[in-house]
Image: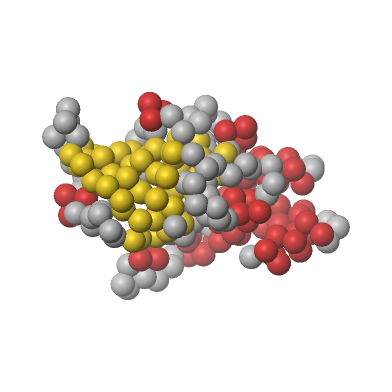
Amino acid sequence: MREVWQNVNAVPGRWKVARDKVAEAAYVVCEETCNNIKACKRKQEFYEAIINAYTIEENYLYDHLNTALRRQRQADYMPTADDLALGPYVLMYQLLLLFWNKLRKESSITYRRMRVSATDLEKYQVGTKFAWMSFVSSSVELEKAVMFPTCGPSGDKIIVFTIDTSTPSHWQPRNIEKFAMYMERERVFPAGAKFLVTNRTPDRTNTDQTNISLKLI
């Protein structure tokens, strides 16, 4: 991936080719997002538009991207036409999270809330290692780690993840708040980040909530 990133940045005009492909990919989900990206006149403006579009709940891009990425875990996984069409956007967003020096790595604690089924909750046992195949949003402020209808699995159980991001790596979450639509103190993990479950306790004030500690590995 580093070679792709270097190629986009080193070859004059190559970013414009990437811009047009990403804009075309976004059209599958939202025509307005497509037009916004295609209108970018500078490379940095293009990069900022990719991140901003991801944070706009109303365009459903977040939902479509992460649903497509999560489906990779299915035993009979076959990408749909829309999944494949979104590929250029997914690739460029992953490259930005991994390599763009305007996005600072986070090394403190971040938080993420999810609503899951009882079956999914049982998968997060102490000592379990797993990877999130989608882009994972979290916040450095617990109060701003809110659940959205588009955040993935649904169910009657709530998990509050406390994530130790101190392990130095390309997979540390990036600070995107400067380019985001909403001020959620958001830190996003690149797709494929791996974690270890280090602690698990029921919440004393909410019987439907479990507090789970993770460490980035």
Reply above or below: 129 against 34: below
Between residues 156 and 113, which one lies in front from this camera angle? 113
Q: Residue furthest left?
A: 207
Q: Visible in this render: residue 154?
A: no
Q: Visible in this render: residue 187?
A: yes
Between residues 196 and 177, which one lies in front from this camera angle? 196
Kindly identify the residue that appears in the image at 23 percent across and 55 percent down.
125
Between residues 174 and 183, which one lies in front from this camera angle? 174
Q: Quadrant of the C terminus?
A: bottom left
From the viewer's perspective, is 90 left or right of 36? left
From the viewer's perspective, is 101 left or right of 129? right
Q: Give the image quarter of residue 106.
A: top right
Kindly identify the residue that appears in the image at 69 percent across and 46 percent down.
101
Q: Quadrant of the N terminus?
A: bottom right
Kindly identify the residue that appears in the image at 43 percent across and 29 percent down.
141
Reply above or below: 10 against 181: below
List x then y, in percent, for residue 96.
Answer: 63, 51
List x then y, in percent, for residue 164.
Answer: 42, 45
List x then y, in percent, for residue 118.
Answer: 16, 49
Kindly identify the residue that appears in the image at 27 percent across and 47 percent down.
199
Q: Give the image quarter of residue 202.
A: top left
